[in-house]
């Protein structure tokens, strides 16, 4: 399995722990919530979904930015070699 899969699994586990803490905090200070495994699972699943979605978007933006930079560098290199080839042929 790739590094991204491990990262996502870690993020999901952290999201589940955060959901449990958040559920306990809300239940203690605001609205009483019955503490059942189902409430933890539902809250954790929703939070994990958004965490992984955000992670995927960040990775995609980074990938796009890197591809853009590589294309820009390749275009600059090709223009330089194109100019050098013209100078050698004259």
Image: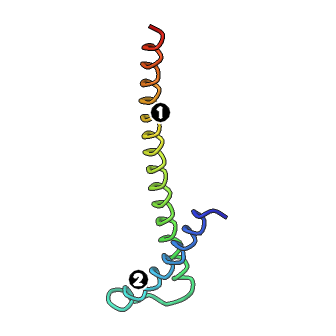
Front: mark 1 or 2:
1
- Residue 70 locus on image (x, y percent): 46, 39
- Residue 84 locus on image (x, y percent): 44, 20
* Of residues 44 and 8, the one drawn nearer to the viewer in this rendering: 8
Q: Residue at x 40, y 82 (%)?
A: 22
- Residue 59 locus on image (x, y percent): 48, 55
Q: SS of the residue at dot 1?
A: helix
- Residue 1 locus on image (x, y percent): 67, 64
* Of residues 9 and 17, the one drawn nearer to the viewer in this rendering: 9
Please rate how many residues cluster around mark 1, counting C-alpha atoms within 10 Å: few if below 14, some from 14 to 19, many from 20: few
Q: Residue at x 48, y 48 (%)?
A: 63
**Distance CA(mark 1)–CA(mark 2):** 48 Å
Q: Residue at x 54, y 74 (%)?
A: 10
Q: CB under 8 Å between callouts 1 and 2?
A: no
Furthest residue in direction left, as rendered? 29
Please rate how many residues cluster around mark 2, counting C-alpha atoms within 10 Å: few if below 14, some from 14 to 19, many from 20: some
Up/down of 14 relative to 35, above or below: above
Up/down of 2 relative to 78, above or below: below
Task: Looking at the image, tell me whether mark 1 or mark 2 is earlier in sequence order.
Answer: 2
Q: In this rendering, would 26 be left or right of 43?
A: left
Give the residue pinned by disc 1.
74
Give the residue pinned by disc 2.
22
Colour logic: rainbow
* Of residues 81 and 32, the one drawn nearer to the viewer in this rendering: 81
Using the image, tell me which numbered label, if any, was put on residue 40: none
User: In which quadrant will I find the C terminus?
Assistant: top left
* Of residues 39 and 84, the one drawn nearer to the viewer in this rendering: 84
Q: Residue at x 43, y 45 (%)?
A: 65
Up/down of 35 relative to 13, above or below: below
């Amino acid at each position: 399995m790739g590094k991204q899969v491990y990262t996502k699994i870690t993020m999901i586990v952290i999201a589940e722990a955060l959901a449990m803490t958040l559920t306990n905090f809300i239940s203690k200070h605001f609205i009483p919530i019955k503490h059942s495994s189902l409430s933890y699972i539902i809250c954790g699943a929703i939070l994990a979904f958004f965490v992984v979605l955000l992670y995927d978007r960040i990775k995609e933006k980074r990938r796009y930015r890197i591809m853009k930079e590589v294309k820009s560098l390749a275009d600059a290199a090709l223009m330089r070699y194109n100019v050098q080839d013209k100078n050698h042929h004259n």
